[in-house]
């Protein structure tokens, strides 16, 4: 090999070495583009919460308590109904619990007497007085049995329908998730969630235990052990059952 050929060969090697990092970067970016993060369209096609969304809407829960003029107070059945209604309000109610009494009807006096029992029944279930909004409503003068109406706002979760088996599970060149994927889980979540409002906005954390924090901080300042003391009954021994 002549001198010129050697110089040309060495130049080709240098150019190739300089281009190697560019080629490596290009190959890596091309490989990552095939398995990178989803965009909005990818999420909609793969994630159950996008493909099978849960609709959360506000609803008004109501309870009517009959107040005929020959009624002196709440019956046992009424008390159970009001108690159950109060429990539902504590579990899923948002805003005030409204108690509406008739005004202008012949049974107004009876309704006011029954209202005292309703107030007591709510208090027995732990409903704070400032959480109840008492308000009158205009009733017809011909309505001798105008009821007392209890109401509160709550959230209701409605899942999307399942049963889309249109794709071929045996042959899918795109390797995408089937259209029915995750639908059952979303439906179960909508039914089992304690308060659908949590699907809209997470609830606040409960406050810390100030008394316990003060004890631990006091021990820390005095150089004492802050861990909870274990009694003699505490044991990590393996059970002897079956031996």
Image: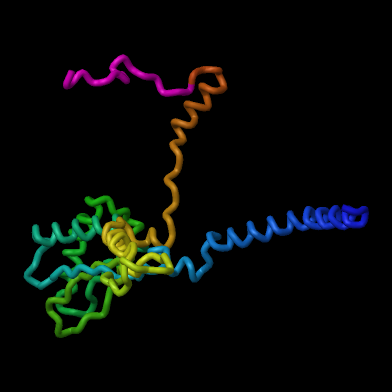
Q: State which region is magenta.
A: 226-243
Q: Quadrant of residue 114?
A: bottom left
Along the line of sight, which residue is nearer the eye, 16 or 159? 16
Which residue appears farthest toward the front when viewing the image?
Answer: 1
- Specify the farthest residue to the right: 3
x and y, in percent, of residue 58 in the image? 34, 70
Q: Is residue 56 visible?
A: no
Task: Name the residue at 80% across, 55% down.
Answer: 18
Task: Relative to 236, say whether 187 is above or below.
Answer: below
**Residue at 21% from the left image edge and 55% from the top image edge:** 120
Verify whether residue 155 appears in magenta: no
Residue 40 spot, x, y in % from top left: 51, 69
Kindly indicate the quadrant of the structure image that contains residue 19.
bottom right
Q: Residue at x 31, y 65 (%)?
A: 183
Towards the viewer: 66 or 210 = 210
What x and y, as percent, mark residue 189? Answer: 31, 59
Q: Nearer the viewer, residue 59 or 109?
A: 59
Q: In the image, 232: left or right of 210?
A: left
Quarter of the image where one finds residue 149: bottom left
């Amino acid at each position: 090999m002549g001198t010129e050929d050697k110089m040309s060969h060495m130049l080709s090697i240098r150019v190739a070495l300089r281009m190697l990092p560019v080629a490596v970067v290009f190959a890596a970016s091309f490989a990552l583009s095939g398995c990178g993060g989803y965009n909005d369209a990818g999420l909609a096609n793969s994630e159950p919460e996008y493909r099978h969304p849960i609709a959360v809407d506000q609803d008004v829960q109501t309870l009517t308590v009959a107040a005929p003029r020959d009624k002196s107070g709440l019956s046992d059945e009424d008390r159970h109904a009001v108690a159950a209604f109060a429990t539902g309000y504590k579990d899923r109610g948002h805003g005030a619990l409204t108690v509406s009494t008739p005004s202008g009807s012949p049974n107004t006096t009876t309704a006011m007497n029954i209202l005292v029992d309703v107030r007591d029944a709510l208090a027995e279930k732990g409903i704070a007085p400032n959480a109840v909004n008492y308000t009158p409503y205009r009733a017809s003068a011909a309505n001798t049995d105008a009821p007392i109406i209890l109401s509160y706002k709550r959230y209701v979760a409605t899942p999307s329908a399942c049963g889309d088996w249109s794709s071929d599970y045996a042959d899918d060149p795109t390797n995408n998730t089937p259209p029915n994927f995750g639908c059952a889980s979303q439906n179960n979540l909508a039914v089992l969630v304690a308060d659908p409002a949590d699907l809209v906005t997470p609830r606040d954390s409960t406050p810390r235990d100030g008394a316990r924090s003060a004890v631990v901080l006091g021990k820390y300042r005095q150089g004492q052990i802050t861990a909870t003391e274990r009694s003699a009954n505490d044991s990590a021994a393996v059970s002897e059952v079956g031996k």
